[in-house]
Image (cartoon, helix red, strand yellow):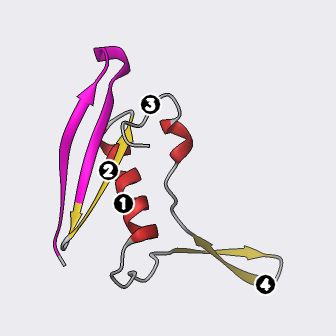
Amino acid sequence: MSHQYKLTHEQGPAHEKCFTVTLTLGTEEYTADGASIKKAQHAAAAVALSKTSYPHPAPKTNRTQLLRGSKLIKLVVMWTVDLASLSHCQPRFP
């Protein structure tokens, strides 16, 4: 399935920009705001994952093995989108 990010709007002074990005996923579109283009893209991807009608991909994991005493412990690290960093950016769409 193809996807495309498009910068659809930017506002604010240079030191405090707010970017709006639209993610096109197949025939669906998702829009989100962020303090940087990359953060807006991540936010749009998070919205798409929560609202898409398409099947979800398998989660990516990073497996690290640690030796604690005599037991081998596997840690699974999941990446998440940090939406807290978007707090200063006011969304254009309620």
Which sits in the foreground, 46 or 59?
46
Which mark sits nearer the N-terminus, 3 or 4?
Answer: 4
Q: Mark 1 to mark 3: distance in Å?
A: 17 Å
**Horizontal relation, residue 63 to residue 8: left or right:** right
How dense is the environment of label 3, judged by Cα within 10 Å: few (below 14), some, or many (20 and up)?
some
Disc number for residue 4? none
Q: Does the residue at mark 4 contact the one at mark 1 (Cβ under 8 Å)?
A: no
Q: Position of residue 85 (x, y in %)?
A: 51, 37
- Amino acid identity at mark 1: Ala
Which residue in the protein does label 2 denote?
A: 41
Span shown in magenta: 2-23
User: SS at mark 2?
Assistant: helix
Q: Mark 1 to mark 2: distance in Å?
A: 6 Å
Magenta segment's dominant SS is: strand
Classify 87 as above or below 73.
above
User: SS at mark 4?
Assistant: strand
Which residue in the protein does label 1 denote?
A: 45
